[in-house]
Image: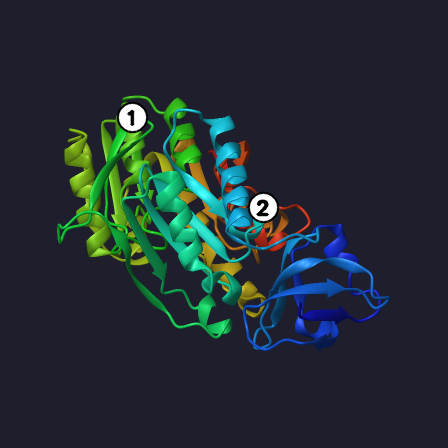
Amino acid sequence: MPKIYLKKNEERRLLAGHQWVFSNEIEKTEGITMNGEVVELFNSNQKFLGKGFYNKNSLIAYRHLTDKDEEIDKAFFFKRLSLANSLRKKAYPSRDVYRLVNSESDYLPGLIIDKFENKFSIQVFSYGMNERIDIIKEILVENFKAELIVEKNDNETRVLEGLEKKQGILLSKSNEDDQSFEVVIDDIIYKIDLLRGQKTGFYLDQCESRKLLRKYINEKYKVLDLFCNEGGFALNAAFAGATDVTGVDSSEYSIQRAIENSALNNLSNINFIAKDVFEYLNELFQTKDRFDLIILDPPSFTKSKKNLFTALKGYEELNYKAMRMLKPNSLLFTFSCSHHINEKNFEEVLVKSASLAKRKIQIIEFRNCSYDHPVLPQMNETTYLKSYLLRVV
C-alpha cells in the first residue's frame, strides 16, 4: 500500500484527535500513483499511525480515516454510516429528518449527508471521498432505502481539492420533473427542493434553535426574523402563537418558499419580504417600529482569518441596530456561523453592540449546532455555529 511519512513530531496534533495532516508536515511519500488513494501513515520513526486519503494537490494533504490497519472498503463505510445513524437515533428515535453524516466529526472526512426520510442530499469536499461516491450511493439505497439522492457539490471548497463544482440528481425513483417534496419537522410542514435550496438544500443545523424559540413566545409578541431564508424561525414563532411576525431575506426564491411553507401550515400571521436585509434594517432604523423578539441569523461574514476584522464589524453593526429596534426587556436571538469567529470574539461583539445601543444584555441561552451536527473539540474547524439568546434591557 502507498505510504506517507511525517516530519519529526508532526503527529502530535493527529494523536490528540485532529483529522488532518497538512502538506508541509510530510517528510516523504512512497508508491502513490493518484490523488484520492488510501495510504498508510507513519511518523518519522516509522511507527504506524493509521490510514487515510491522500491528495498531493491540496494543502490538506491527508485526511484520517482510521487508527487501525483495516480494509477501507464498502463494509468500512457502511459501518461508519451506521454508527453515525445510531447516534442520531439515540437522541430522537422517531425523527426521520436529520444530518446523517457530518464529515470529519463523524470520522468520514469530506462527506456530508442530510437525510429527509428516504431522500438524501450529499456534499463531498475531499478527493478520496469523491472517488467513492458510488459506494456511498449503494449503501444509501441498500441500507437506508433511498429513493432520491441529490449531490450539492457547487461549493468553492471542492476547487481547493482539485474537484469540479457541480450539482444534480444521482438517483431518483420518481419520473416527475419536480423533485420537491414535503417533510414534517417538529410539527411544522416544509416544502423542500434540494436542488434549488441553499447549501445542502435546507438548514438542518438550526432545528433545535427553532424549537427552543417556542418556549419564549406569547401571542402578544411582535417578531422580526432577519435573513429568514425559507422561514424556519418565523414559522416556529407563528406556530408558538405570535400574532405579528415578519420575515426578511434578499432571496426571492427563499421568500417564495417561505410563503408556501406558511400556507402549508395555515399560518396567516406572517409577512415575508424579499429585500436586502441591511437596506431593510437601515430603513426600519429610522422609524419608531419596535419588536419583542428579533432573530438575527446572517450568512457567514468571512471564509478566512484575513477578513476577521471586517466580519466582526459587520456583526457589530447588525447587532447594534437590532438591539436599538427592541422594546425594553425584549429578546434577541443572534447567531454567527463562521468557525473563524470563536465564542470569545462573538461575545465581545455583543458587548460592544450593547454599549453602542446603550442597552444592557443578559445571556439566557447558548447553543451550538443541533444534535445531529457533532463537534470534535480537538478540531476547531468543526465548530462553526454559535447562538445566543439575549435579554436586552
Residue at 40 percent across and 58 percent down: it is 134
Location of residue 278 by image quarter? bottom left
- Kindly identify the residue that appears in the image at 13 percent across and 54 percent down: 177
Q: Which mark is residue 347?
A: 2
Q: Which residue is mark 1?
A: 187
Q: Earlier in the sequence, mark 2 or mark 1?
A: 1
x, y percent for residue 310: 51, 65
* Quadrant of the frame with the N terminus: bottom right
- Which residue is at the front of the view, 18 or 230? 18
Q: Position of residue 169 (x, y in %)?
A: 27, 57
Mark drawn on residue 298? none
Q: Nearer the viewer, mark 2 or mark 1?
A: 1
For label 2, the SS is helix
Q: Amino acid at mark 1?
A: Asp
Does 116 sit left or right of 7 as displayed? left
Mark 1 falls on what kind of element?
Answer: loop
Q: Residue at x 33, y 67 (%)?
A: 166
